[in-house]
Amino acid sequence: GAVVSQHPSRVICKSGTSVKIECRSLDFQATTMFWYRQFPKQSLMLMATSNEGSKATYEQGVEKDKFLINHASLTLSTLTVTSAHPEDSSFYICSAEKGTEAFFGQGTRLTVV
Amino acid sequence: GENVEQHPSTLSVQEGDSAVIKCTYSDSASNYFPWYKQELGKRPQLIIDIRSNVGEKKDQRIAVTLNKTAKHFSLHITETQPEDSAVYFCAASKSSYKLIFGSGTRLLVRP
């Protein structure tokens, strides 16, 4: 299988600050990565598609100015939660495709206090 | 866009019994249907998948069936074990990776 690494695994930040989450494909190149959000005991909701070298595609209802996505290389996509508020607290997880299978990062639990 | 519905939301079975989880999808163009197992606080792990050109796939105690006409697919786990306890998600996609997930099923296998 392939390895997708996400960092940090946990982060606590103050309300109003910004937090950056990294998603790396360690042993393969990924032109496309995906960012999901998961609330406790709920499903994974697709937030956006991260495209290497171009703008991300956001799902309906996701604020692109609040959730900034950058995919500057074939192995790295970043999600920045800007001006975080307590309601942004959630589990954020990325995925990347290798071949015909999607591989997930280990997720980032964000807590905004 | 695609919409995936999953039932039941919780399922409790006795060890050794079978468990069945069902999903329906809305977009007839979807052609890839994976199933993921997620343990608390961890990443989803692919357990089995099926493509629209086959109707059934089996891997040891796990099987998936697909009915394209009815647009539904099911996960079957036989001889359940306590370590099968987890949340299971179905998903559908028109490609292999932009996955739309079902709402999840919390499976509890009682020893």
Image (cartoon, helix red, strand yellow):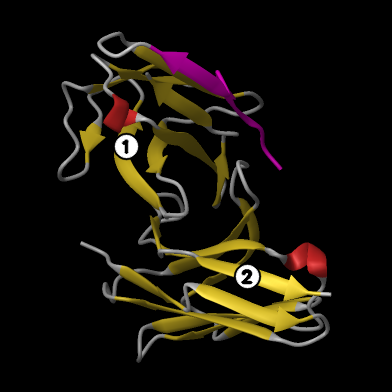
Task: Name the image quarter holding the C terminus of chain B.
Answer: bottom right
Q: Residues within 10 Å of mark 1 (few under 14, many from 20)?
A: many
Which quadrant of the view contains residue A112? top left
Mark 1 lies on a secondary structure that is: strand
Give a yes or no on whether discs 2 and 1 share a subunit: no
Q: Which residue is mark 1?
A: A49
Along the horizontal axis of the image, is A14 left or right of B11? Answer: left
Number of numbered discs present?
A: 2
Closest to the observer: A12 or A52? A12
Chain of residue at mark 1: A
Q: Position of residue B11 (x, y in %)?
A: 58, 77
Q: Residue A5 placed where, x, y %?
A: 61, 26
Asked whether residue B107 is in view, the answer is yes
State the separation of the CA atoms marked 2 and 1.
30 Å
Amino acid type, callout 2: Leu
Residue at numbered disc 2: B107
Residue drawn at (54%, 86%) of the image: B55
